[in-house]
Amino acid sequence: MPTALITGANRGLGLEFTRQYAAEGWQVLACCRRPAEADALNAVAQRSSGKVRVLALDVADLNAIDALAKTLQDTAIDLVINNAGIYPDHHSDFGKTDYEAWMQAFRINTMAPLKVAEAFVPHLERGAGKLIATVSSKMGSLDDNTSGGCYLYRSSKTAVNMVMKSLSLDLAARGIRAVILHPGWVQTDMGGPNALINAEQSVSGMRRVLANVTSEQSGHFFSYDGKEIPW
Ligand SMILES: NC(=O)c1ccc[n+]([C@@H]2O[C@H](COP(=O)([O-])OP(=O)(O)OC[C@H]3O[C@@H](n4cnc5c(N)ncnc54)[C@H](OP(=O)(O)O)[C@@H]3O)[C@@H](O)[C@H]2O)c1
């Protein structure tokens, strides 16, 4: 069965990705910042008959990404999901911009996904799936921005979209595809209770997109329901 590496796997969409891929029989390298405190993820791992391996990874620590890639150097990986993300705009309206929070958002939402790709390309080359998925957001779409604000989050996601577009072109010769996903507005800690869909619906949809993505669609930006999102 294929192997997926997922960041931010301890809650929200990352936990649901882990659940669903493991239920389908995949091996899952489930990365999270603090494995000892990841109760829900550890429970999924315990029920998985060895399919889910919980690994420590704080994606803000770019050296730790390299270190994990080295630890896993003999492992073939079919799918890497850059899922970990933060929403830093809670206290950052225009006039009160928190520039430190903005830099941290770029580190986690924008730079870490590229660093993960750089570190894990050798593992992806060994796997058959050859796919990198980055969970971005429609809030990073320039076209979709009709309400303004959210400078920090929006710009970090717009930037990661561009990063992944370039990556898709750079990795095409190696047969590796890179796609960008919008999960919908989802009931997680980030999305809140009023969100329109639950994690099960969002992740089922994104998995369907990933299962069907072609080489020609590498570098494209898809919603969980399969629709393409304008930049
Ligand atoms: N929910 C939505 O409506 C929505 C909409 C559009 C896009 N998204 C995107 O979907 C992705 C997942 O979001 P979610 O809704 O599942 O959010 P969430 O419930 O807040 O979960 C965020 C996950 O990211 C992890 N994370 C944050 N910083 C990290 C770091 N430095 N290193 C490793 N992991 C880190 C968190 O781990 P800790 O528990 O350790 O903090 C947690 O596992 C994000 O990229 C988000 O931007 C979500």
Image (tube, rainbow, N blue to C red):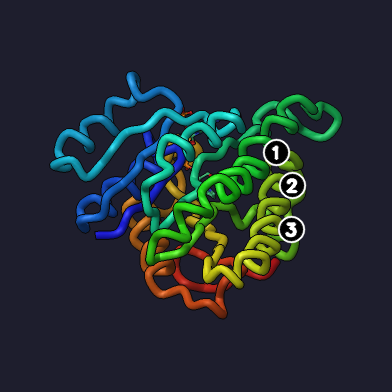
- Decide: few, some or many residues near mark 3? Use Cα within 10 Å; few <14, some 14-19, many ≥20: few
* Label 1 environment density (alpha carbons within 10 Å; few <14, some 14–19, many ≥20): many
Q: Which mark is residue 146?
A: 3
- Quarter of the figure with residue 127: bottom left
Q: Nearer the viewer, residue 70 or 7?
A: 70
Q: Earlier in the sequence, mark 1 or mark 2?
A: 1
Residue ID at (74%, 33%) = 102
Q: Seen in the image, is 29 located left or right of residue 173?
A: left
Callout 1 secondary element: helix
Q: Which residue is mark 1?
A: 106
Task: Let me know if residue 13 appears in the view.
Answer: no
- Whether tag 2 and tag 3 are in contact, CB under 8 A, the answer is no
Which residue was labeled with disc 2? 155
Report the disc number at residue 58: none
- Marks 1 and 2 in Cβ contact (< 8 Å): yes
Percent position of residue 214, x then y: 48, 77
Type of the residue with mark 1: Phe
- Marked residue nearer the N-terminal end (2 or 3): 3
